[in-house]
Amino acid sequence: MGDITLSSAVRNNLLSLQDTAVLLGKTQERLSTGLKVNSALDDPASFFTAAALNNRASDLNRLLDSVGLAVQTIEAADEGITAITDLVEAAQASARQALQSPGAVTPNVAATVVGTGASVAADAAAVSTGTVTNVAADAAAVATGTVTNIAADTAAVGTGTVINGGDALELDVTNLNIADGTTITISDGTTSRTFEFDTGGDGVGAGNFGIGATNQTLSQAITAINGELSNAGVNATFTDVDGGADTQIRVQATNATDSIQVTTGGGGAATVLAAIGIDGIGAGADATDRTISPTNTTLDAITAGQTLTFTTAAGDSTVTFGTGAGQSNTRVELLAALNGGASGATFALNSNTLEVTGASAAAGDITVNASSGASALTGLGFTSGAVSSATNTTLDAITAGQTLTFTTAAGSSTVTFGTGSGQSNTRTELLAALNGGASGASFAFTGNTLVATGANVAAGNITVDASSGASALSGLGFTSGAVAETTNATLGAITQGQTLTIDIGGTTETVTFGSGTGEVNTAAELNTRLAEIQTAFGTGTTVSADSSGNLTVTSSDTTSSITLGGTASLTTFGTNLTTTAVAPTAGTTVNNSARAAAEAQFNTLRTQIDQLSADASFNGNNLLQGDDLSAIFNSAGTSSLTITGVTYDSAGLGISEATAGSFQSNTSIQSTLTELDTAISTLRTQASTFGSNLSVVETRQQFTNNLINVLETGAGNLTLADTNQEGANLLALQTRQQLSSVSLSLASQADQAVLRLF
């Protein structure tokens, strides 16, 4: 551009336009920013001074925010104090309301005396005892057959004829045709012995006794057999009937009890008994097994199949006559059948007479009965339907028809003596009649003495009476009209005439001990007298004794004392009893429900105080829960205010919880009201403190706001543009710019005039 040459007029106009454009740009910048100093280049002193002022104002603005939070925190605490104050005042109202209701009441309890450790014996039932001690024992019933010719049993016997018999008969195969090894066993039902024929001479089996060796005669064999049977204990013998002729042999039991059984075995079993002639003796299925039994001529005469029965209270004993199974044909079988029966009676033969004795007097009568036909009865000397009864010699002596009566409160028990229907002639019948009576008493024999014992104490006395005639009384040792009374071992031992006195509030009642009229000798009489005393003292009074004799006395009112006395020992009716007066005692306290409700309401309000105190926070800071607050007023931190927090829950305010029942006491309520008054005073004082703190903080807040305005105004004065002035400047510069443009145009036209020359 240096190569271009401008005229002076053009250059001047151009410079003027450039200056105007620069000024116009600055003016437009001032108008757009509102600042006359936009950078340090515009006015370094004003720019930096205004910047410092604005920075300080910004710092104060930031502090102002925290000051505002402090104000809200204080206001939150102040609102909390106000609300807590309202709750405390409500708690005061509850406490004052409780004071307007009556307090708890503790009434007196009537005086009571209760004995312990007493051991008064129980009353014993009345006992009536006959004085005679020789009442005979009952004799059991005895039934005896009148015929005395029952034959004795005959021992079992059987006789046979020997085949080929003769003198000095030898026991060999040739003569008797008995095979070698044949055995004969002889048994009496309990013991047995086996004999073996050794006709071959080759010996016998183990345990057998050998007979029939060569040249041994029948007589010799019988002798040997009898010796061995005796040694073995078998109750049987063999006999050579014809005295050595060896033509007849007899088998016989050695007693009238056992049956004899002969059995055979081996090769000649079927023929050996026939060989010696005893195959037909007794009874048996065949010639190898024969049994002979005892016999009795009297019992044989009784028709087979007939029966004889003896009946007692226990049951029947029956014998069936005959020779069959289960039948009896001998004395032994007869006694076995009867003694094995259910009657319980004892059957025995006394010489040739059958005697039947009851098991005891209690077994009752013995009745004899037979099946159709008289031979069973006549053979043994009994009469069908005969009855034998128990007997008693003492009771037999009492005149028949006389009575003896025992009377108690429950009723009477009467016995009528004699042998007729409904009468008593034995101890058993006597006890059955009396124990079955209405008296309820228990009758029993102690040794030979009749003792009547009342059913219980309530049954009262036992009175004895008899019908006309003395034998019923004298026979059993009683006295007509005699009375047996209930007894008490403890009270009966108290000296007659001694007393027990009971005084309630100055009124005295007396118990007198003894057996006289109106006196006390049993527990029942004591209870009756105590009931009378209770009635005398009036409704509400208790006077009684328990089953051990412990005395209980309770007054009917709450003012009277109880005093025990008398000449009898008080420890009889309770080891703890003394003559010291017993006064009424304090009873159970009864709380007032209105006060209890006020107490519950007070504790509810106290809980609300705790909860409200915890909720009175702002921005995480709670001045009522002990948090401190610091308000900073300048950026350097040299100006500040610290607000100290308080703990204003119920504990911090000194408001104690109302314990259960505490509002029943005026003193306790007054103590609570004192705590509430102190709490309200504390709240008001703290509210004033928080108000003062709030005033300081708000004052500083206002001051800071004003100071910020001052700083910002000062900064604005240094840097803010005058828009009116700058607007005028802009118009002037625009006009200048237009004029400069016109002037430049004119200058350019002047320069162009040269071109006209061409």
Image: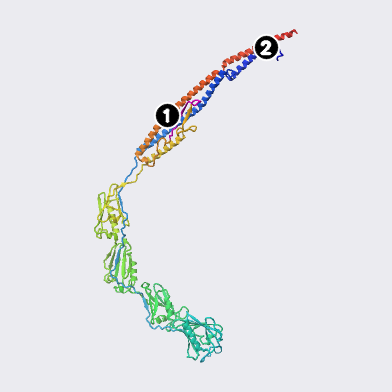
Mark 1 neighbour density, 10 Å: few (under 14) some (14–19) many (20 or more): some
Residue 306 visible, this angle:
no
Residue tagged by mark 2?
A: 11
Does the magenta segment cover residue 477?
no
Q: Report the magenta residues as a range.
A: 633-648
Q: Is residue 703 above or below residue 311?
A: above
Image coordinates of residue 713 in percent, x first then y, are 52, 19
Tell which of 630 and 252 is nearer to you: 630
Residue type, mark 1 in image: Thr
Kind of residue sitting beneath label 2: Arg
User: Is 563 positioned to the left or the right of 279 in the image?
Assistant: left
Q: Residue furthest top?
A: 757
Identify the main secondary structure in magenta.
Answer: loop
Q: Name the element at disc 2.
A: helix
Percent position (x, y) of residue 145?
38, 80
Name the residue nearer the viewer: 106 or 238.
238
Sequence-wise, the earlier of marks 1 and 2 is 2
SS of the residue under disc 1: helix
Residue 529's mark?
none
Q: Which mark is residue 689?
A: 1
Q: Is residue 385 above or below residue 61?
A: below
Which image quarter is the C terminus in?
A: top right
Task: Work out which residue is located at the far right of the displayed protein and give it.
Answer: 758
- Residue at left offset 29%, top offset 55%: 571
